[in-house]
Image (spheres, grey):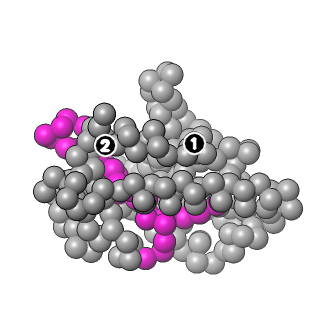
Amino acid sequence: MKFWEEIKNRSSENVIDYYLDYKAYDKKFMYYDKELEQNVALELKDFIVLKVGFILKGGWDNDNNCGLYSNEIDCFDINKEEFFLRSFKWWIILKWIYNDIKEELKSKQVNLHRTLTVLMDWKVMRIALKSKAMVEIGKLLDEVDINENKIELSEFEENKFGGKTYYVPLFKKWKKITTAETTKAKELVEKLTTNEEEAKNNWPEDDDIPF
């Protein structure tokens, strides 16, 4: 059994229902449907932010012919914890704090994403935002108390790059979180925290990393 399959089998039940990526040229939030074997659009409504973090995604591992992604850093300072960048098939490609590997990440076309794990319609979703969308949501998170208020998708800002039009999602402060929603949110945060602690305990030691 591969190391990563073993980790998956040892981890607690995943509470996240959808992993959403934003497609800037299509102006859509998409998740991969395993049964349909294709990306499916999902319309964002107002939501409660359960936690925020950072993750590395994108690029391509030519040796293993698959994509790349990392563990999620659960903090606001991306240089306080190490990223483990690995291929979807097995190998860990890089392990270090962001500032020390960002140039190599560029060469591999791997992007830094801000992640929001949210509760929407009683479903848990992780939204990954990069580039200008990451910057804009960061500004809002500095202004809004996410323990008190929901966040809503407000509009799409039109931009151009290289002659192509793309759209940046802009969010805004929304309604107060209800008592029932707060209770459910706390329960989910506890489960997410437990899963994260298990994952951190299961990350490989230096001797297990093939470089």
* Mark 1 surroundings within 10 Å by alpha-carbon count, few (fewer than 14), some (14 through 19), many (20 or more): few
Q: Secondary structure at mark 1?
A: loop
Q: Secondary structure at mark 2?
A: helix
Does the segment drawn in magenta span residue 53? yes
Instruction: Evaluate if marks 1 and 2 touch, with contact meaning CB atoms under 8 Å apart.
Output: no
Quarter assignment of residue 52: bottom right
Instruction: Give the label on residue 88, or none.
Output: none
Horizontally, residue 51 falls left or right of residue 25, namely right
Q: Position of residue 97 (x, y in %)?
A: 29, 71
Is residue 103 positioned above or below 34 on the image?
A: below
Q: Which is nearer the eye, 73 or 194?
A: 194
- Farthest-out residue, top: 36
Residue type pointed to by label 2: Phe
Magenta-drawn stretch, dominant element (helix, strand or loop) = strand
Coordinates of residue 202 in the picture (x, y in percent): 39, 54
* Left or right of residue 58, residue 156 in this image: right
Which residue, given by chain and number where applicable, does mark 1 sit on? 13
Residue that carries the numbered disc 2 in the rendered image: 3
